[in-house]
Image (cartoon, rainbow, N blue to C red):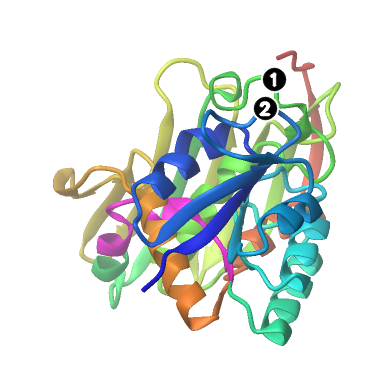
Amino acid sequence: MSPIRVAIVGIGKIARDQHLPALAANPDFDLVGGVTRHEPPDGLDGFRTLADLAAARPDVDAISLCTPPQGRYALAREAIERGYHVMLEKPPGATVAEVEALIALARDKGVALFATWHSREAPAVETARTWLSGRGIHSVGIVWKEDVRRWHPGQAWIWEPGGLGIFDPGINALSIATRILPQAMVLHEAELFYPANRQAPIAARLSFTHDRAPVEVELDWRQIGPQTWDIIVETDSGQLTLSSGGAAMAVDGQVVFEAPEAEYPNLYARFAELVRARAVDADLAPFRHVADAFLLGRRLEVEPFED
């Protein structure tokens, strides 16, 4: 079977750190170019627009869209209308409605669309999902704290409307929670902490219920030192802890599963399946929770943030 000819659109930090290495290691794909406003990596043909790519490489099958969420809808729509299969880096767009429109368009055109949640591919996530199945959930605590200067240095787009602010990493936690918990969560209260000089929050506290069980979420982008990515679930048969962003799972304090990270290789393996089947995989549950937080959240102002 011939490799899928794919181009990267938007070659920033996440594309260089994760997408390019994952593609290079996957024989199902042949990376044929990149659409970027900047100098492409050595050995990769660069194009300014999708039209330039299409003119130079009419054989392209798919694109992986790694731009910031603002403006992504127009690019994804153009790609789908050109007949390309499309993979979306998270978050899948700037609004829920525009991603729903892309899903409908992809189905109408008969092309694959993959709205990815890379944290769901953390090694212990499916083990946790299986362990929680059939158990009674008493409470859930999620603590996701990291240093924005380490992970998003100088990326001004994350502080603009549509950039999500703290929900750029926080949606990773929500993507895991919506995967492993047996029932849907419903948001009841939210506090969003906005720096005085920014248009997106730097921290958030969210209160959900899962059936009748409370789910408390604490997100913060001001963490210095070790980073915290933990989910703790109290059940009728013990405490489950997912740590290191889903890399390790413990039950009652004893590690029962841990494995090396392979999130983006797994995403591209799934994308190859979707391309072959011309199928859509787009679970918007994490994105809807973020939209609900902006709808319901009480805005609180905190000190200015300077990068």
Q: Residues within 10 Å of mark 1 (few under 14, many from 20)?
A: few
Q: Is residue 229 magenta?
A: no
Q: Is residue 147 above or below residue 131?
A: above
Residue positioned 47% across, 52% down in the render: 118
| Residue 156 as seen in the image, left or right of residue 210 | right
**For the residue marked with disc 1, what is the amino acid?**
Gly
Q: How many marks?
A: 2
Residue 299 lies, in percent from the top left, at 82, 39
User: Where, by quadrant of the figure, is residue 126 drawn?
Assistant: bottom left
Residue designated by label 2:
39
**For the residue marked with disc 2, what is the amino acid?**
Glu
Residue 270 lies, in percent from the top left, at 42, 66
Dot 2 lies on which element? loop
Residue 302 lies, in percent from the top left, at 77, 23
Q: Is residue 284 above or below residue 280?
A: above
User: Where, by quadrant of the figure, is residue 222 drawn?
Assistant: top right
Magenta extent: 113-128
Residue designated by label 1:
154
